[in-house]
Image (spheres, grey):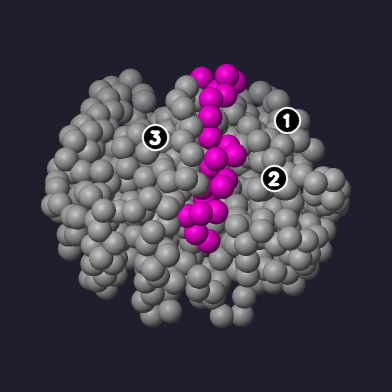
Amino acid sequence: MHQLTLTDISKALAAKQFSARELTTHLLARIEQLDPQLNSFITVSKESALQQADAADELRSSGINAPLLGLPIAHKDLFCTEGVRTSCASKTLDNFIAPYTATVVDKLNKVGCISLGKLNMDEFAMGSSGETSFYGPSKNPWDTQRIPGGSSSGSAVAVAARLVPASTGSDSGGSIRQPAAFTGLTGIKPTYGRISRWGMTAYASSFDQAGFLAHNAEDCAMLLQATAGFDERDSTSAQQQVDDYAAALSLPLQGLRIGLPKEYFSSDLDSRIGDVVNNSIEQLKQLGATFVDISLPSLPHAVSAYYVIASAEASTNLARFDGVRFGHRCENPQNLEDLYLRSRDEAFGKEVKRRIMIGTYALSTGYYDAYYLKAQKIRRLIKNDFVSAFKDVDLILGPTTPNLPWLIGSKIDDPVAAYLEDIYTVPANLAGIPGLSMPAGMIDGLPVGVQLLAPYFQEARLLQVAHQFQQHTDWHARTPAGF
């Protein structure tokens, strides 16, 4: 059962090949057996999952066969879930029980999804490897000595290891697409505002976007269909019509024009990953797509601009964690200042402190114009590059990552090297456009992803191309040994 996709599970439940409780029990047993070596879960919701499974079985026995009814999922631990710990993988929220449920989780609950628990991540989503978690790093099931990518590390590991068929994630600078590429999954970051951010703990508010990791584009389409749409509680939620994502999957690729930015194929790219990208291009050509060389001239400045703006927003968003209202509080504070200083110092990890300091510095008097304002100008240039490019092409294709997943610990003391691994993913977040990473090859036993980018609210086109590619390749169906 654990090898089935969401689509397969939906059909099997409708055909009564097994019950939601049988499936949930099976997956919970796998989590108990296998997760100690992977560290993908922070909290396992065994009792509530079984209750949800029983409720789903009752509904199916009454003749209701909604597509997602009784399908298991797990959530990145920054989505608030009422009555369940929501830690953001930080000591400061280790004891925080959310009093309400995030919109994306609530929508999935309402269509009958079963939550198996909350997943590990980089602390407050700050990281590209999964190593900054208070609960320790998640490990890549393809090679447990290597990182799975981040910040949605547990979300990727749990799905890749077949502990759960799909998961929620968040993507501020590549945090869904990069781990999807490193673990052989399909990961989609929708347009900014496509899915409500209400109840999703903020890292960088103008970048954060909820999305999904699953085995294929068809499963991502199911999840996006259930969660996309306007939410009046989220001021950044888009009042935009939601497409029929499932209907778009079967559309042919004839006539589709795909851009290849020259900046994506520089010396920074591992040549072996370049070969995988070229093989994907040839496969898509056979399916009817045509390719056009384009340029995104501002892309080399994307990482610098992203880390200035995102860190500035993080320093503001994390100011609320002060040891007063909720979260970790130091022992025996001498006064209010001591309470603030020691509570934050004890509770935040090294990477979170680094980004708070960078952001506070960039926003300070005398440096605002030189750093933050200049970064915002670069952000607009990057957006303009994409808008201009999409006048000539329907999609943009390139590598998701410049390198393969690295060994755990090898870059933990070199944050700039880790930041540069985001060079191909952060531009989409700066511009707010949707992006998708799909499995496209293997190198030395490790998965490699190819990234697709689309104009605003054209997620259906991303899913269409990925689905057609997956109908003619099997990279998405490969399983790490032992799982």
> What distance separates the C-alpha of mark 2 from that of mark 3?
25 Å
Left or right: residue 367 compared with residue 317 = left
**What residue is drawn where x is 62% and y is 57%?**
6
Classify residue 402 by image quadrant: bottom left
Residue closest to the eye, 244 or 476: 244
Instruction: Tell me the residue that label 2 is attached to.
Output: 66
Classify residue 201 by image quadrant: top right
**What residue is drawn where x is 66% and y is 64%?**
163
Question: Could you tell me if residue 213 is visible in this image?
Answer: no
Q: Quadrant of the C terminus?
A: bottom right
Mark toward the start of the polypeptide (1 vs 2): 2
Magenta span covers which residues?
Answer: 215-235
Left or right: residue 233 compared with residue 378 = right
| Contact flag, marks 2 and 3 (Cβ < 8 Å) | no
Front tag of 1 and 2: 2
Image coordinates for residue 393, horizontal then vertical, percent? 21, 43
Left or right: residue 243 compared with residue 18 = left
Numbered badge on residue 457: 3
Up the image or down, 196 lies above or below 393; here it is above
Q: Quadrant of the N terminus?
A: bottom right
**Mark 3 surroundings within 10 Å by alpha-carbon count, few (fewer than 14), some (14 through 19), many (20 or more):** many
Image coordinates for residue 48, horizontal then vertical, percent? 83, 48
**What residue is drawn where x is 69% and y is 45%?**
66
Mark toward the start of the polypeptide (2 vs 3): 2
**Mark 1 surroundings within 10 Å by alpha-carbon count, few (fewer than 14), some (14 through 19), many (20 or more):** some
Is 223 a magenta residue?
A: yes
Residue at disc 2, secondary structure: loop
